[in-house]
Amino acid sequence: MQLRPLAVLAAALACGPPPAPKDTSPVPADSRPQPAPKDTSPVPPDTAPPGSPARELPIRTGAAVPTGPQVVTHAGVGSPLSDADGAERAAAAGGDVLASGGSALDAAIAAAVVLEDDPRYNAGTGANIRLDGRTIQLDASLMTDDGRFAAVAAIERVRNPIRAARLVLDSPHVLLVGEGATRFAHKLGLPDEVPRSPQAEAKYAARMKRLREVIETPGTQEPDWRIYWNYPGEMPPDMVAWRYGGDTVGAVARTADHRFAAALSTGGTSVTLYGRVGDVPIYGAGLFAGPAGAVACTGHGEEIIRQALARTVYQALAAGTSAREAVAQAAAAFDPRWDVGLIAVDRDGWGVAATQPMAHGHVP
C-alpha cells in the first residue's frame, strides 16, 4: 500500500498537510487504469462528516442477496477494470469452495491465492520490487467471524503469503514478521521461492525511469530517497522509483448459514523503506470480520491504519447499515488526498466502493 513521503510528512508537521502532488509522468500502456463507467446512483447525504463534501465514487455497486453463499474480491484500488477477469476467477474459486461445503475462511483463502498467482496484481507473483531492485517483501492477513486473526508482515521468499498467514492462525501467535515469518513458513512446508515475475520486473524498470525524470526536474517535491537508504546492500547506481505503488488484493466470504471471513495480501510499494509495514497485517485496519459480516480495504495504508477503517466499517454493518451503503459511506468520507477501495459482505448482501477504478468480482 502507499507510503506517504517522509519529506511531505515533515512539512505537514510544520505547517499542516499539503495537497498530494500529482504524478503526471507517463504510465506504461498496459498498466494504465481504464476509465470506469459512472455510477450515477446518489450517495446519501450522511455519507461524510459535517462540513466534508462527499467524494464522487466511480465504483459503487452491490446488491441484496439475503440467502446463499457469497464471495467478493478486489484487485486493488486503481487496478484496471480490464483486469477484472482475474478478480472474477478468484471469486469463482472461493464460490467453488463454499459450494463443496468449505468454510468461509477456506473460500477467502482460495480466492486470495488466485489473486496472488496472477502477476497483473500487486501480491504474490506480481508483488512490487523494492528500491534496491532485489527485495520483495509481502504482507497478508485473515480473520474469521469468531474473532480469530492472523497475519505475516515483511515476509520474503514465499509465493503465497496468505498461506503463511493461515499457518500463523494455528500457531501460538497472531503476527509474525520479517525473517522470523519467512523461517516459520519454510519450516511448516511452504516452498522457499522468490515470487518474482517478468511483469513485476517490467513495472519496476518503467517506474525507475519515471522517478529519475521526476527527481531531475527542477523544483521537484519528490524526496531524495537515497537519504533514507536502509536496505541490506549497496544502493543501485541509478536508484530511483515511482511516486505511488500498486496495491492490495482481497476477498470476503459468507457461507449459506451466515459465517464470515476476510483475507488480504499485498506486495507493498517500491517507494518505501526496508521493513515498512502497511495496514494489511494490522488488526482492524485492512480487514475485519464478525457475526455481522466481513470487510476488506485497499488504498493508502497509513491513513487506513489511522482510521482503523475495516473495523469502523464493520461497526456500521453491526449497527444495521447495509454492506453497499457502509462501504460507499467510508469511501466518500475518506481523506480526499488519498484513494481507497472497500469490499464487504453482510447477512443480507454485498457492496463494493472505490475512489478510483478497481477491478473486482463477486459470486453469485
Image (cartoon, rainbow, N blue to C red):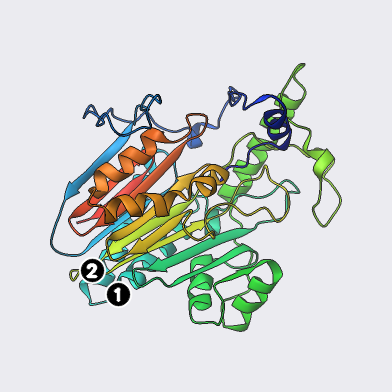
118 relative to 226, above or below = below
| Residue of label 2 | 255
Amino acid type of the residue tagged 2 in the rendering: Thr
- Relative to 101, is 14 on the left or the right? right
Judging depth in this view, the residue of 249 and 30 nearest the camera is 249
- Relative to 49, is 204 on the left or the right? right
Judging depth in this view, the residue of 61 and 28 nearest the camera is 61
| Residue of label 1 | 103
Q: Earlier in the sequence, mark 1 or mark 2?
A: 1
Which residue is found at the position 36% from the left and 65% from the top?
108
x%, y% of residue 328?
31, 39
Amino acid type of the residue tagged 1 in the rendering: Ser
- Spot the residue most to the top: 218
Q: Are marks 1 and 2 in contact (CB under 8 Å)?
A: yes
Which residue is found at the position 28% from the left and 37% from the top?
60
Q: Residues within 10 Å of mark 1 (few under 14, many from 20)?
A: many
State the CA–CA distance, disc 1 to disc 2: 7 Å
Q: Residues within 10 Å of mark 2 (few under 14, many from 20)?
A: many
